[in-house]
Amino acid sequence: MFLQQIIYSFVASIVYLVLGGVEVWYAVGFGHMTSALKEVLDKYSGPGHQVQFVDSGWAVAAALLLLCALLNIADGVVVCFRRGRYHVMLKYYR
């Protein structure tokens, strides 16, 4: 049960890091939009007005996902040390 929680925390932090990286890529990618994508955004949201809002939303989503990854890593460390100093390492590497 204890090791399973560590594994789930590690997998969740990897997923959060990957999704946070994708959100960062979307957040900074609007400076390099293709002309077709700019035309679609201008058609539906007006000339450039909503792009900054969407860009800010992606940046906030990226920050929250990366924060979740850090909190999952911190949770794994706390769980490891709560069970005793290096309990996991001593039990499985003897």
Image (cartoon, rainbow, N blue to C red):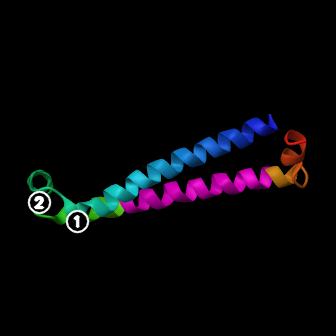
Residue 76 drawn at (x, y percent): 73, 50
Q: Which residue is mark 1?
A: 31
Residue type of the residue flagged with mark 1: Gly
Disc nearest the viewer among 1 and 2: 1
Which quadrant would the N terminus be assigned to in this image?
top right
Q: Nearer the viewer, residue 11 or 54?
A: 11
Q: Residues within 10 Å of mark 1 (few under 14, many from 20)?
A: few
Residue 63 lies in the magenta stretch: yes
Q: Residue at x 11, y 60 (%)?
A: 46
Q: Main secondary structure of the magenta part?
A: helix
Residue 38 drawn at (x, y percent): 13, 57
Q: Horizontal placement of 84 versus 54: left or right?
A: right
SS at circle 2: loop
Q: Which range of residues does the magenta coloring cover?
A: 58-79
- Give the vertical position of 89 relative to 67 (above or below): above
Residue 48 drawn at (x, y percent): 15, 64
Q: Residue at x 89, y 46 (%)?
A: 90
Q: Earlier in the sequence, mark 1 or mark 2?
A: 1
Q: Residue at x 52, y 49 (%)?
A: 16
Q: Residue at x 91, y 52 (%)?
A: 84
- Give the vertical position of 24 relative to 14 (above or below): below
Residue 36 drawn at (x, y percent): 9, 51
SS at circle 1: helix
- Report, in whole angstroms, how far the alpha carbon at label 1 lies from the one at label 2: 17 Å
Residue type of the residue flagged with mark 2: Gly
Q: Horizontal placement of 14 versus 74: left or right?
A: left
Residue 88 lies in the magenta stretch: no
- Residue 46 is labelled as 2
